[in-house]
Amino acid sequence: MSMSATPTRKEREFQAREELILSHARRLLLEKGFQAWNMEQLADAVEYSKGTLYQHFTSKEDLVLAVSTDALRMRADLFEKAAQFKGKTRERCRAIGFACCEFAYNYPEYFHIEMMLKSASFWEKASEERRQAHAFQGARTWRAVNHIVVQAMALGDLPSGRFTPEQATFALVSVTVGSHIMTQEPILRVQAGITDPMASVRTNQDLICDGLGWQPLLHDYDYASTDKNIVKELFPSASAWLHLE
Amino acid sequence: MSMSATPTRKEREFQAREELILSHARRLLLEKGFQAWNMEQLADAVEYSKGTLYQHFTSKEDLVLAVSTDALRMRADLFEKAAQFKGKTRERCRAIGFACCEFAYNYPEYFHIEMMLKSASFWEKASEERRQAHAFQGARTWRAVNHIVVQAMALGDLPSGRFTPEQATFALVSVTVGSHIMTQEPILRVQAGITDPMASVRTNQDLICDGLGWQPLLHDYDYASTDKNIVKELFPSASAWLHLE
DNA sequence: AAAATATTTGACCAATGGTCAAAATGTGGC
DNA sequence: GCCACATTTTGACCATTGGTCAAATATTTT
């Protein structure tokens, strides 16, 4: 039994099967949410039996948490990539906004899943291991945003007197999550006359940044060319969800 | 059988029982979320049998939707009451912010329930009647905010060139819901150093208002006395969640 | 090839949302 | 007060599904 860096064939097979299960579970989750499928169906889909699923995951919740954490890891990757964008701090923050849209486009149901996780009974049914993995990826996303905020304050782009970096980060995170959830609500979309959900999310982020006094403010600077660069350099495939006028 | 304004004794009894069921369901929901209780337990609690519950509600989801709509009605009541506050438009918007905190204090789990409702399978299991009731109360809350925004633009307190009233309303709603959800997340609370969740929510609302250019901006005006008046006139019982320094 | 070990399976269990025939209760006529 | 009829309540019962585990199957070792 190898605990070392070189996995045995068995271990590789186990890993491959875990990814197979996760990919099918992800598909079911994105298509049907949480309730509208069961472990039997998943077992059929991956062509293993139910019992085998339970050798990988302690419960349905544990499995869903694993899918969610995978998505969160991808989001953290995008955030960290976006944070490297060369430019003013607010442009880099903007790049993260684009990263989040790119993510939301690929995992349209993720924010609902994330909300589900917040309901108490989920965490107690999941394994400690996966809980920690989720917390770790969550911390990465937080850190990516917070890091830019701290730098912005250090550089004087963002006033540091009124709010702590954490308060500013919290405001950005809150508005982003809230906006993503709300744009996915058909009724609200009609009420608010939203035709481009991702644009609405980014607009709301801009409002928070402006509110924080993050220079340069929206009407003092032309972000159109910034946006073009962000897309060109970081998210060339963003045309699927991006509608730049 | 009376369809008129004067209900028969039977109809009154039916109504009373429905409220009994709803009040117990509300308690269970707030204490345990959705999963951690079942219809049998609720039946025991109200001292009727399971079958009787299903004469009032078509499914567990239908019941939960009814509870949620009741809460939403209360929120709409608070919003409409807050909108009557005498003062500048931004002060009245602020009053609604307080109303939402007052609501959140009384229904701490409501936003999680609301998120649950957004998951597809819920709506299809609920009755058409209750779906409409929910939409109606949702529209009331939206309208209360939107009405102030429209007035603010008409009065010139809020610039009307850059955003439509609906976009501004949407931004406020998004940041509020997002902030309420996020402040209830223990991990995030630690990360963001949040000691007063309601204050954080209201701060985020202020950031959006400032971002929208809603006069008078936060640093041009002392809202402390406004806040005192809002509390005194509208929410005298707010001391439970309010920590004015 | 046989024994030992590891893995996979699906029948089975318990919990629970939902149903419905039967019991209980209420109502009206005499 | 009693009977027939209508309405309401009940809880045994059903179907679904998350989760378990002894037996079957596959793999490795001797």
Image (cartoon, coloured by chain):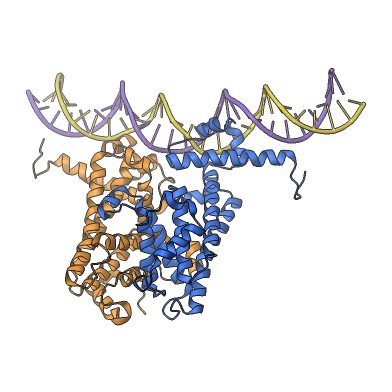
Chain colours: A orange, B blue, C yellow, D purple
Q: Residue at x 44, y 71 (%)?
A: B167
**Split into 4 quadrants, where in the image is the N terminus of chain B?**
top right
Task: Name above or below for residue A242 compared with residue B53.
Answer: below
Q: Does B191 sit left or right of B225 as displayed? A: left
Is residue A225 shown above or below B59? below
Rendered-image quadrant of the C terminus of chain B: bottom left
Q: Position of residue B6 (x, y in %)?
A: 76, 47
Residue occupying the point 39% across, 75% down = B213
- Looking at the image, which is closer to me, A45 or A6? A6
Question: Looking at the image, can residue B205 be seen?
Answer: yes
Residue B184 rendering spot, x and y as whole percentages: 36, 50
Q: Looking at the image, is A200 positioned above or below residue A173?
A: below
Q: Is residue A225 above or below residue C29?
A: below
Which is more toward the observer, D21 or B42?
Answer: B42
Please indicate, yes or no, whether residue A109 appears anywhere in the rendered image. no
Q: Residue at x 39, y 42 (%)?
A: A41
Along the horizontal axis of the image, is A43 left or right of A128?
right
Q: What x and y, as percent, mark residue B106?
A: 47, 48
Is B245 left or right of B231, judged from the image as shown?
left
Asked where in the image residue B210 lies, by quadrant, the reply is: bottom left
Residue in the foreground of this view, choosing between A1 and B109:
B109
Total numbered labels placed on residues in the image? 0
In this rendered view, identify the residue nearer to me: B54 or B171. B171
Q: Position of residue A107 (x, y in %)?
A: 34, 58
Which of the 4 image quadrants contains residue B14? Answer: top right
